[in-house]
Amino acid sequence: MLPKTIVMRFAIAVMLATTWICCGKNDARAQVITQTQPDNPGSLITTNLNIITQWNFNTSNPSMSPTTGTGTISSTGGSSLSLNGNLTPGPNNTSSPSSGRTSLLATNLSSSGSGVQFFASTLGSTQVIIVQFDIQATGLAAPSTLAFEYTTNSGASYLPVTNGPSNEITFSNTNYYHVFVNLTGLGVGNQPGFGLELVTVGSTNIAGGAVTPNPAVGFNIDSMTIQTTPEPTTLVLAGLVAGSGLGGYGWRRFRDRKVAFGTSSMG
């Protein structure tokens, strides 16, 4: 029986190939999220896509500027953003400064609509858009739930990913999680005003208490990556399946923790 990691990589590769061929710009069948706990955070599930923009914060002079491409980061809902360089070992530790890995730290989170926004133009991309990132709650007083929403008008309005029970990322501990989001079918490709936000939902923290703004508790976010495929050809699609499903990328064990993004009452 094939290891679960290979099966997952193969399934994701097939999904990307078939949704590009079948789904078009506005078909919701392509929309999916997986939330998993990796052995080696900081690496991408699908590495043979083109990177549009990436923030990994692990340079000799860490900043909130992208390490690949162009884009901006902003706080929302009263949150505070800073760079947390006190984490070692951790995601991307092989490329981190000697002082340890650096992540984006979002704190002072309130009970609803508070978090961080990432903006990056997708002009020139295909309609296959993939977002991947690592995230970790820094303590049990952190909010238990974050919503993933996207925009194509530079943040004037946001929409949840549809076609499923939830557009939320949930936390029950302080482990690192790798989140993979397939935005194919939402018309977010070739959009100068593309962006996404991770914002709090509800009033309960991980420990079961009430969410209150706290400058010492929040979420570490690392390796925020926005990707697209080249224009599809038989060769590219075959390479995508072979490379992601059976290639020599670092293997990773996953806990069975998958969540489908879906319809939300959030505005």
Image (cartoon, rainbow, N blue to C red):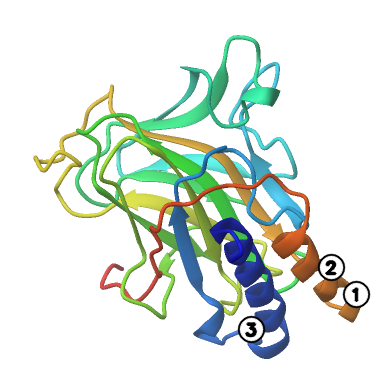
Asked if labels 2 and 1 touch by Cβ distance under 8 angstroms, the answer is: yes
Q: Residues within 10 Å of mark 1 (few under 14, many from 20)?
A: few
Q: CA distance from mark 1 to mark 2?
A: 6 Å
- The outermost residue toward the top is 99
Percent across and percent down for residue 225 are 63, 48
Residue located farthest toward the left when viewing the structure as drawn: 209
Q: Residues within 10 Å of mark 3 (few under 14, many from 20)?
A: some
Please name which of the two marks, 3 or 2, marks the residue nearer to the observer.
Answer: 2
Indicate which disc residue 239 carries.
Answer: 2
Q: Is residue 9 left or right of residue 133?
A: right
Using the image, determine if residue 14 lies above or below residue 22: above
Residue annotated with mark 3: 25
SS label for mark 2: helix
For the residues labelled 1 and 3, the Cα–Cα distance comes to 22 Å
For mark 1, give the secondary structure: helix
Q: Secondary structure at mark 3?
A: loop
Query: As shown in the figure, which amino acid type bears the numbered disc 2?
Result: Gly
Residue 153 seen = no
Q: Residues within 10 Å of mark 2 (few under 14, many from 20)?
A: some
Task: Residue at 40%, 70% (x, y): give it.
Answer: 260
Left or right, residue 131 beside residue 261: right
Quadrant for the N terminus, please: bottom right
In the picture of the structure, the residue carrying the numbered disc 1 is 235
Image point 28% across, 22% down: which residue?
Answer: 216
Question: Residue at point 53% right, 21% down?
Answer: 89
Compared with 11, 135 (above or below) is above
Residue 157 appears in which quarter of the rendering? bottom left
Q: CA distance from mark 3 to mark 2?
A: 23 Å
Q: Amino acid at mark 1?
A: Leu
Q: Residue at x 30, y 38 (%)?
A: 78
